Amino acid sequence: MPDLTGKTALVTGASRGIGRSVAQRLAADGALVAVHYGTNEAAANETVATIQKSGGDAFAVRAELGVDGDVDALFAGLESGLDGRPLDILVNNAAIIDYDATIEKVTPAAYDRQFAVNVRAPLFITQRALPLMRDGGRIINVSSGVTWFATPEITYAMTKGALNVFGRSLAQSLGGRGITVNTVSPGITETDMNGWLRDPQATQHVAGMIALGRHGQPADVGDAVAFFASADARWITGQVLEVNGGLLLG
Ligand code: NDP
C-alpha cells in the first residue's frame, strides 16, 4: 500500500460518494485528510469518524461551492485544520449534475450554476492551493465518461469536458514544480448522484453495458485516485484515466 505518511490532502465533496472513498483511502495510506463538504455536516462527520476509527487522521471543512466567497471559506477551514502544514494532494471531486439541464430545458441560470460548481470552483481552489502546496505535489481532478459518450445532461457533460482541458494545461504549467496533474474519469458509479441505479432493472441494464458486468462502487474510483496521489505515479501527468469497468467497449 502506498505510503502517504506525513502528507496532507484536501478532497472536495468528501462527505459522500466517491469523495468519501477517496478520503478514506488517502487516510488509510497515511495522509491527514481535509474532508470538504457543502451542506451535509452529518455525512462529513461520518466520513471523518470512519477514518479516525480506522486509525487515520482527518478533519471536516464546510464551504458551499459555486457562490461568492466559496474559496475564502474553504481555505479558512483548510488552513485552520492544517495548522501551518503544507498541502501535498488536492482532489477536485465535488460536482453537481442537473438532470433538467437538457438542450430543451437548460436556462442561463442552470448553466451558470453547473459551471460555477464544476469548473470555476476547481480552477480557483487550485489557484489558491498552489502557494500552500509543496513541490512534487499531486492534483487529481474527477471528471466523467460523459466527456466521450453522449448524454442528455448536456451542460454537465460540457463542464466535465472543460475539466479535462483544465487538467492538461495545468499539468504543463506545473511541471516545473514537479506537481503532477491527472484526471480520473469514472463511469457509472453507485452514489447519491445516481439514485436511479437503485432500481434493479436499471442495475441490470447498466451491467450489460460494462465489460466487467457490474456498475462501479465508490472505492473502485477512490483506489484509482490514490494511485495518482502515490509515488508510483510520479512519471504520469496530464492524463485522463477512464475508471469504468470497461463501459461501452463494444
Ligand atoms: P455525490 O452527489 O454522491 O456527492 C457529491 C459531493 O459533493 C458531496 O460531498 C457534496 O457535499 C459535494 N457537493 C456537491 N455540490 C456542492 C457544492 N455546491 N458545494 C460544496 N460541496 C458540494 O457525487 P458522486 O460521488 O457521485 O460524484 C463525485 C464526482 O464524481 C463528481 O465530480 C461527479 O461528477 C463524478 N462522477 C460521478 C459519477 C457517478 O456515477 N456517480 C460518474 C462520473 C463522474 P454535501 O454532502 O455537503 O452535499
Image: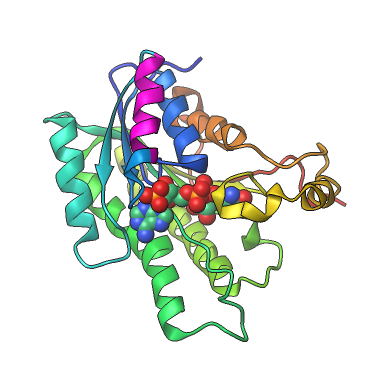
Residue displayed at 50% across by 66% down: 159
Report the side of 247 relative to 79 (left or right).
right
Residue displayed at 38% across by 16% down: 53
Q: Quadrant of residue 26?
A: top left
166 or 172: nearer the viewer: 166
Residue displayed at 41% across by 23% down: 50
Residue 54 position in % (x across, y down): 41, 15
Main SS category, magenta section = helix
Residue 248 position in % (x across, y down): 80, 52
- Height in image: 197 above or below 89? below
Residue 74 position in % (x across, y down): 23, 49
Report the side of 112 relative to 104 (left or right).
left
Q: Look at the image and give the residue range highlighted in magenta.
A: 43-54
Report the side of 49 relative to 234 (left or right).
left
Q: Quadrant of residue 72?
A: bottom left
- Height in image: 142 above or below 235? below
- Height in image: 23 above or below 129? above
